[in-house]
Image (tube, helix red, strand yellow):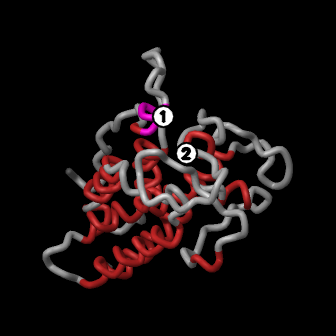
């Protein structure tokens, strides 16, 4: 695929929504999710004007989106309060990317890694804890810097499950979509007044993805 060719359309029906709402009638309305077309959009928008990276953007996006095929590993999606394990996954993938090992495709590794980076903002309450800040800051991926009260939604299929009692479910907390119950909430005051929590999650995930692309540019540049 040419470097600047439009990306193929991606499904608009979310895997998780189907699992969490199995009895929802087929009403023809799309159920957009961060995991699918928003992951692709985030990754495409964050991509720098670097010809080497752009030449491999289709691989990066495909690897990012394909990560959602695994709904059994909490760590891939920062589910079930797996903050330390998710941060370690990102660090381990960077170690492989920067190793220059010929047998490994760095763009595949980078794509799946950015999926995890993006899910942190949609699946945790980071945005809720920082909604008074503009812009919402990007987590530095240091576990010790996480604020008190940080939690991510519990999802029934994947493990490990590390949340304490009374943690919200993924369905209750996710900002995967502008129409999810949490994503649709409007900020009532402060510098982000009038924006939805989905808007804030998307913007923070975009900034976080840009930071990862900057690091990739140092590796392949």
Viewer-closest of 75 and 38: 75
Identify the residue position indicated by label 2 in the image.
170
Q: Are marks 2 and 1 in contact (CB under 8 Å)?
A: yes
Q: Is residue 185 left or right of residue 100?
A: right
Disc 2/disc 1 C-alpha distance (Å): 9 Å
The part of the chain drawn in magenta is 16-20
At 38% from the left edge and 65% from the top edge, which residue is drawn?
Answer: 113
Q: Which mark is residue 196?
A: none
Q: Position of residue 67 (x, y in %)?
A: 33, 53
| Dominant SS type (magenta) | helix
Q: Does dot 2 land on a helix, a strand or a loop?
A: helix
Q: Position of residue 208 (x, y in %)?
A: 53, 65
Q: Is residue 173 left or right of residue 129?
A: left
Specify the quadrant of the image occupied by residue 159: bottom left
Q: Position of residue 152 (x, y in %)?
A: 58, 56
Residue ranking furthest to the front: 165
Identify the residue position indicated by label 1 in the image.
20
At 65% from the left edge and 72% from the top edge, which residue is drawn?
Answer: 146
At 34% from the left edge and 74% from the top edge, which residue is drawn?
Answer: 93
The earlier-in-sequence mark between 2 and 1 is 1
- Residue 122 visible in the current orientation: no
Q: Position of residue 8 (x, y in %)?
A: 29, 40
Viewer-closest of 207 and 108: 108
Q: Tell me, yes or no, whether the highlighted magenta stretch contains residue 174.
A: no
**Image quadrant in which the C terminus is located:** bottom left
Q: Tell me, yes or no, whether the highlighted magenta stretch contains residue 18.
A: yes
């Amino acid at each position: 695929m040419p470097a600047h060719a439009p990306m193929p359309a991606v499904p608009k029906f979310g895997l998780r929504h189907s699992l969490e709402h199995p009895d929802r009638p087929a009403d023809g309305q799309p159920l957009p999710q961060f995991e699918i077309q928003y992951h692709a959009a985030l990754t495409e928008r964050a991509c720098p004007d670097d010809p080497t990276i752009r030449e491999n953007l289709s691989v990066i996006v495909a690897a990012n989106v394909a990560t959602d095929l695994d709904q059994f590993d909490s760590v891939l999606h920062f589910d079930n309060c797996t903050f330390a394990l998710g941060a370690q996954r990102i660090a381990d993938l960077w170690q492989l990317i920067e190793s220059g090992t010929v047998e490994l495709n760095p763009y595949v590794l980078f794509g799946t890694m950015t999926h995890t980076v993006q899910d942190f903002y949609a699946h945790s309450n980071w945005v809720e804890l920082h909604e008074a800040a503009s812009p919402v800051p990007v987590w530095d991926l240091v576990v010790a810097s996480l604020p008190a009260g940080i939690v991510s939604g519990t999802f029934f299929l994947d493990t490990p499950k590390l949340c304490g009692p009374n943690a919200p479910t993924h369905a209750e907390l996710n900002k995967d979509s502008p129409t999810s119950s949490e994503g649709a909430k409007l900020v009532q005051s402060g510098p982000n007044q009038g924006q939805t929590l989905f808007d804030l999650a998307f913007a923070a995930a975009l900034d976080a993805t840009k930071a990862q692309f900057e690091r990739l540019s140092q590796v392949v540049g």
